[in-house]
Amino acid sequence: MSTPTIEPTVFSGDPYSEQNLLEPYPFLAELQESGSVSWLESQQTYAVVGYAEVYEVLTDFETYVSSGGLGPRDIRKDDAWRPPSILESDPPIHTLMRRALTGVINPGTVRGLRGEFTAPAVRIIDELAKRTGFDAITDLAEIYPIQVFPDAVGIPLEGREHLLPYGNMVFNAFGPENYIYQQAFAEGDEHARVVMNACKRESLTDDGFGAGIWAKVEEGLITEQQATLLVRALLSAGVDTTIFGIGNTLSVLARRPDAWARLRKEPSLAKFAIDEALRLESPFQKFHRTTTVDTFLGGVHIPAGSKVQLFIGAANRDPKKWGNDANEFSLERSSSGHVAFGMGLHQCVGQPIARLEMEIVLQQMLEKIHTLELDGEPTPILHNVLRGFESMPVRITTGN
Amino acid sequence: MTQLSERLDVVVAEVEHVADRVVSLVLRRFDGEQFPVWEPGAHIDVYLGDDITRQYSLCSALEDRDVLRIGVLHVQESRGGSQRVHETLVKGTPLSISAPRNNFPLIDSRKYLFIAGGIGITPIIPMIENAEANGREWRLIYGGRSRQTMAFAQQLEDKYGSEKVNLFAEDEVGRLNLQTILGMPRAHMLVYACGPGGMLSAIEDFCMGWPPGALHLERFSADTLGAGSVSEPFEVELARSGRIVKVETTETILDAVEKVGVRILSSCRAGLCGTCETRVISGTPDHRDAVLTEADKDANDVMLPCVSRSAAGCGRLVLDL
């Protein structure tokens, strides 16, 4: 091969410092300047920040496998804290699980949810619109998905309070075992027990996605254990991410009264606005893959068995892909191709559900809220791999 | 550029029985000129008289523009097309055809898995030639009832070797085991499949475990076996503005609508993710995606404008755009 080898820049910054977790973009820009692929000294991993390189890793699932886990440790070598999920599996095991899941969750089955997903959004936003301001996170983003999504999966009402802490554990475990991780795992056993219980066939309603997944056991496609793990995957991946998706979209729009005004005039642009906001403020910011062979990425030689860390938030703002205004929100931009939902084999299977929830919320808000502005700076959440806010006070005006 | 409506006058230069109930026809232009350039996956319309038009995939060598070759299976429940080909066309018969068009283009990729069932081998043959010429890694899985029914099987095996060309004759080794073949997705490998509907449906199911966008297939309906669907130009009315957009044969609805500045949210642009799903207000779509359920496709309330088109005989679709 004539591939010229580039020595990766050794980068000493720490993506998991409090400052860089709360305010990731200056750090990511600096990391990007050191090259598309760098050696991250603090984590002893390769950092991949270029869009093209992230895309390459995501689509070459043979060279960059998932079974080593999405976190910095190789879960095949250590004891993982839980049985591997679909996210942490490779073909052919992944193939069966993905077939089962795609058969249950697809644009067709999700379309039927619009009605039942709309009513709670109408209720919540009608109430909020009576006020002059509210917290877009605690009064809305954290409220809505938890009202609709667990019903769609069909889990019992009892124990739903464990879903958010459980999701918090799952995602924090994709980062290092720092104090944030320790805090997330503080009552981990109890959260995991309740959630695993909810995934059992006898806990689920007969008409939700959960029952649909269990039907695949009867068809002989997957095992009972795999069915439990797939329902668990829905519950762990389907709540936090959507909460942050809604919150992050509003964090972008609350700073752009011009965009809000235009969206009110052209509500059909709402889904483009969401897509662009997800590019700019991607909820799932970073995770790892493991190399199976010696390989080259962005000209950098990476030995077999290495952990590479993908920075989605950097790829989605890479000026080489998105232009010099990559850090700006633009309703004119086609954000098609962004990797906020991943890409390729492991691309988010719940994407149509997340988009439906986000679109319904935004449509309802645009209908009833004339102006939306920040009423103080949002408070970012301290999380190893997710980007979002724990609080975002907003001021609104309505026609009343 | 060749006009889409242009008819080419040709003569049948060779008729050869290449398998049970399959003839290969080699066509030459009447005026001795070369045929227009075409690409793997392309087909021609063959005008068989009495308003019978059939589409047949091209399976001749890409660089030999003096001839076109098609393979035609004599279908038992034929509506008359394949029967007419088999019974009336002999060497020297004049015939009228369309210029080649392509509904099943081969997208450049690092690796390919080709799966052909029966006469579905025809569009795959030039694809293989192209993949081989470009040094791509590829493998062909070709299934049929028996060796005698599998057109071009021996030539392909002789030319490329049995490592790349895997023949599965049902009477010798049983049916294709799609679980084994598709149970292990490969990175950067596209799957191109052509054959009977039942086989393609099974392939679609197995490919749900592959990366979105990996699968490309050409569906034959039972009564036009050996024929791809047609792509005539048609109009789309954008209901919200009343605008009329012409969709040419060579473009998708998505392309045409975006060209006039109207936006549709899309992601894969290949009929696989469903992001561009659009409500159909009137008209009948020809669904070509792998996302909508059969019930959705029958209801015709929504369609995916990235791949689907207007059904034959439906000159205008009215979409909620």
Image (tube, grey):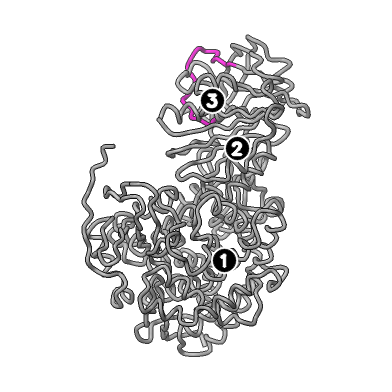
Q: Which residues are magenta?
A: B26-42
Mark 1 sits on what residue?
Answer: A353
Q: Which mark, residue B218?
A: 2
Q: Chain of mark 3?
A: B
Q: Is residue A50 visible?
A: yes
Relative to B97, B269 lies left or right: left
Figure quadrant of residue B117: top right
> Residue at horizontal 23%, vertical 45%?
A5
Q: Are marks 2 and 3 on the same chain?
A: yes
| Frontmost residue, A196 versus B75 | A196
| Frontmost residue, B245 versus A317 | A317
The overriding secondary structure of the stretch rendered in magenta is loop
Q: Is residue A264 visible?
A: no
Cα–Cα span, label 2 and label 3: 25 Å
| Frontmost residue, A241 versus A216 | A216
Based on the picture, tell me whether residue B34 belongs to the magenta stretch: yes
Q: Amino acid at mark 3?
A: Ser
Mark 3 sits on what residue?
Answer: B162
Seen in the picture, residue B316 relative to B98 is either above or below; the reply is: below
Cα–Cα span, label 1 and label 3: 45 Å
Residue A390 x, y percent position in the rendering: 42, 82
> Residue at horizontal 48%, vertical 30%?
B39
Q: Chain of mark 1?
A: A
Mark 3 packing: few (<14 Cα in 10 Å), some, or many (20+)?
A: some
Q: Determine whether the residue tagged by mark 2 lies in a helix, strand or loop.
A: strand
Residues marked 2 and 1 touching at CB (< 8 Å): no
